[in-house]
Image (tube, grey):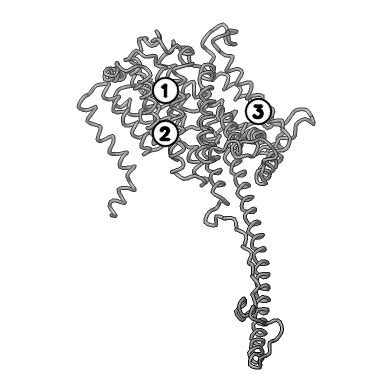
Amino acid sequence: MDLIKKIWTARKLILVVMIPLSLLPLPLIHPCSESSCAYVLIVTAVYWVSEAVPLGAAALVPAFLYPLFGVLKSSEVASEYFKDTTLLLMGVICLAASIEKWNLHKRIALRMVMIAGAKPGMLVLGFMCCTVFLSMWLSNTSTTAMVMPIAEAVLQQLICTGIADSLEDSVTVDTQDEESEKEENQESSKNHLELLNRKQNERHEVCMLSEELNGLTLKPGFGPEFSKDSNGYLPEAPISIPAPPKKPKIRRDSLYPTKRDHMICKCLSLSITYAATIGGLITITGTSTNLIFAEQFNNRYPEAKVINFGTWFIFSLPIALIMLMLTWIWLHFLFLGCNFRETCSLSKKRKTRREILSEKRIHEEYQKLGPISYPEVVTGIFFILMTVLWFTREPGFVTGWTSLFEKKGYRTDATVSVLLGFLLFLIPARKPWPSALFSESKGDDDDEEEEDPLAPMITWKDFQRLMPWEIVILVGGGYALAAGCKVSGLSMWIGRQLEPMSGLPPWAVTLLACLLVSAVTEFASNPATLTVFLPILSALSETLHINPLHTLIPATMCVSFGVMLPVGNPPNAIVFSYGHVQISDMVKAGFGVNLIGVFVVMLAIMTWGEPLFHLSEFPTWALMPNVTGSL
């Protein structure tokens, strides 16, 4: 047993050592570029899926194995680790750091919840809407970490109010019971004394009667009727004991006042992680998987010019809205039941005491933020400006602002992102003019700002605290693998192996890809799963003469649906850590959300996705000479 425990403890180290050694015969027996590239790809994929080493460290494997096996030069591999999407991500993180530093996210979340109200159904929907909106621009993990404390404060207010109500009811019932018991004791003792006195009098009278009967004299009032009806005793008065009032059932074995309160906590907690996932689908910068797809697709098909911020937003926004409503209905049915009229009513007459107190708590949290500050206004302006510039760069149906420049193709979404992010390091956090419209800034570095009146909106520490360097290196590792597959011709070999699937219709191929990716991503990280599957799906689409977007876009979206387990993605782990839900709750609810996601994505790709991306025809840009390359 001790040996088994030691082996289990060192299982990750054993896996790290044994996987490369066990696969080493592949490049040694078949010394060619395809087998060498396949060896590096399999080793990296196993490290990613098993998480035997950190994801960022595993992404560095191609950096030293490709040069060792002669697949790519070291300088060529190094150039793949920093791409245009890295700059795009850095600019977005600058804006996210400003939003978090000046509490703009709290103001947005609390305001939307105040509009929704404190009814359980509307409360859940309100939190889901604000989470979706924030997750469009921030990472899913950051959004969940920001919104969950606000939701937890509301839930704790709900729980405390429920416990107080239960205790108040129980104290009232106990007092009534004690008083009724005293009255009953007094009445019973009084009745008992009366009965004893009556019985003694009866016995005395019976004795007198028997003596007088012997003397043939009867006392008035006692005749044959007395002996017949009372059988020698006086009729006893009936004693009515009132039934004690029923006490409410209080769950003394749980932290929650009632089972319904526990269900509300489960529903609200899970709705936040699902809403963060849904919101990340809407924008190309919403999740790292969207960035991985966009960069690798544009690298593989540089002549496509179909994936940008606008086209992705137009395609994914209806998906997110439909998923939002269906997910809310599913969670409401699962945890709150089907009585939508009771849980979603906006009427003030139907509000309970706890709902009123919960709304009061939300208003108190909002009042703590004070009036809107100058840094919040600046952050909001930058937020709107960045979105508008992304939409109008190359919208497709009209001429974008890039047409104002003579040279084409030099400016991307990353250009706008980095420019505005850079300005946040320069603009002072204090308003340059006195005004009563905005309050003074209340950031985390108030002491520093008092000393330096020209302190900027964000500092490098603020940026560095949120910058996900692990994701940057992970994305770079995926680019390096793609470059190796392109040079070695491994994707051509993979495409030849997939020719037997040519008889399947496009929708069947896409559905199989969505189901496979959704199943794998439950146990592996989303970026790692997508990085492994993109080359395979790209080669499959080219072999079957299917528009690559027909399979790549649904797979990119479905890879985010790892919502059944706490290890599926970081938002799940954050929500699980609060202790309101169990793994069985996540599996049950996540399975339905997973099916909803696959269904809606398939509906989108077969309806409004076809005219938007021209999916019904095999494009000419997919017949480029680099068809042997890989994503």
Q: Indicate which disc residue 379 carries.
A: 3
* Label 3 or label 1, whichever comes before in sequence order: 1
User: Which residue occupies 24% across, 35% down?
Assistant: 22
User: Which residue occupies 72% across, 38% down?
Assistant: 370
Residue 521 lies left or right of residue 369; in this view the side is left
- Asked if labels 3 and 2 touch by Cβ distance under 8 angstroms, the answer is no
Residue bearing mark 1: 80
Residue toward you, 618 or 78: 618
- Asked if labels 1 and 2 touch by Cβ distance under 8 angstroms, the answer is no
Mark pair 2, 1: CA separation: 21 Å
Residue bearing mark 2: 525
Residue 483 shows up from this direction: no
Q: How far from the left and from the top, in percent, is residue 315?
A: 51, 19
Q: In the orientation shown, which residue stands out farthest toward the top?
A: 406
Q: Which three-letter amino acid code belongs to the residue tagged 2?
A: Ser
User: Which residue occupies 29% across, 25% down?
Assistant: 38
Mark pair 3, 1: CA separation: 33 Å
Q: How many marks?
A: 3
Disc 2 element: loop
Residue 276 shows up from this direction: yes
Nearer the observer, disc 2 or disc 3?
2
Q: In the orientation shown, which residue stands out farthest toward the bottom?
A: 215
Q: How far from the left and from the top, in percent, is residue 88?
A: 53, 23
Q: Residues within 10 Å of mark 1 (few under 14, many from 20)?
A: some
Q: Which three-letter amino acid code belongs to the residue tagged 1?
A: Glu
Q: Which three-letter amino acid code belongs to the residue tagged 3?
A: Thr
- Quarter assignment of residue 78: top left
Q: How far from the left and from the top, in percent, is residue 378?
A: 68, 27
